[in-house]
Image (cartoon, rainbow, N blue to C red):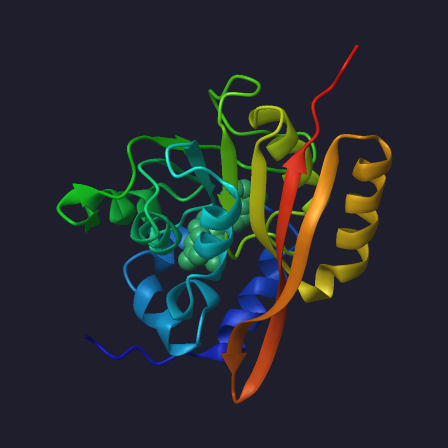
Amino acid sequence: MTKHKVDHDAIREKMRHNGQDPECWKEFYDDWAGKYDAVFESVNWITSKTCRIAELMAKHVPLDNKVLDVACGTGLSGENLRKVGFTKVDGHDISMTSIEVAKEKVYEGKPIYDNFKTGLIAADKKIDDIPDHYYDSVTCSGAINQDHIRVGDALTEFHRIVKPNGYAVFTAKSHAEVPFLSTIEDMMQEKKIELISAERQIYHTEGGFNHYCYCCVIKMVPVYN
Ligand SMILES: C[S@@+](CC[C@H](N)C(=O)[O-])C[C@H]1O[C@@H](n2cnc3c(N)ncnc32)[C@H](O)[C@@H]1O
């Protein structure tokens, strides 16, 4: 595999700049799609290093559930879902170039994803063309943080697209811990979700320093009128 040198300072600068505008991430990940897998492998990335999110999915979610991999990028997270046995997996991302890379990937001779969706998840934006409560469960690896998808926006969209009693299994970067916990608490008080578990895991390693995230399992509470 080609070795890609990672310029962490340049990435951080770009991230600081892009963090102002969620739309900028589309361009950033479009640029990165061809080298994403090699770069993220080199930073001990949670999705390439472990299968933890997929394992948690398999622990709670029936393997024949229709699942959406939100912010699937180049498909590393979807590949893990196939490895643990999920059979109906769609992918979603804002970066169409990343989706083109994901489309080429196969696991045991079959495409990783059945269908693709796109659309920015933000305060006033939701994924295109997904009716309410369309998916049995969703997962999202490596995209809920203060720069990409805010935890409140993610949970609102997950709650909209997942069926009652379905699950959302996702990483939330630990610098988002406070809004993450209070957002979950608010939605629990509104009786929209139930927190099943939140475990701290290494997210990635940079210059010998570990960054952490929470791997969260949430269940959608049915609404009774
Ligand atoms: C670090 S990558 C994670 C990709 C893959 N899930 C993995 O584990 O390797 C983050 C992904 O989130 C997507 N993304 C960033 N901000 C987003 C937003 N506001 N709405 C939807 N997708 C977003 C990017 O295009 C990118 O593919």
157 or 17: which is nearer to us?
Answer: 157
Q: Give the image location of residue 53, x and y in percent.
A: 49, 55
Q: Is residue 49 left or right of residue 162?
A: left
103, above or below 158, in the image: below
18, above or below 187, in the image: below
Q: Which residue is drawn at 58% across and 41% down?
A: 168
Q: Give the image location of residue 170, x and y in percent.
A: 57, 50
Quarter assignment of residue 193:
top right
Q: Residue at x 31, y 30 (%)?
A: 115
Quarter assignment of residue 33:
bottom left
Q: Give the image location of residue 52, x and y in percent.
A: 48, 61
Q: Give the image location of residue 42, x and y in percent.
A: 37, 77
112 or 39: which is nearer to us?
Answer: 112
**Quadrant where the N terminus lies?**
bottom left
Q: Can residue 146 be seen in this view?
A: no
**Quadrant where the C terminus lies?**
top right
Q: In this view, does 106 lie to the left or right of 129?
A: left
Q: Is residue 20 visible?
A: yes
Q: Is residue 96 left or right of residue 55?
A: left
Toward the bottom, the furthest residue is 208
Quarter assignment of residue 34:
bottom left
16 or 119: which is nearer to us?
Answer: 119
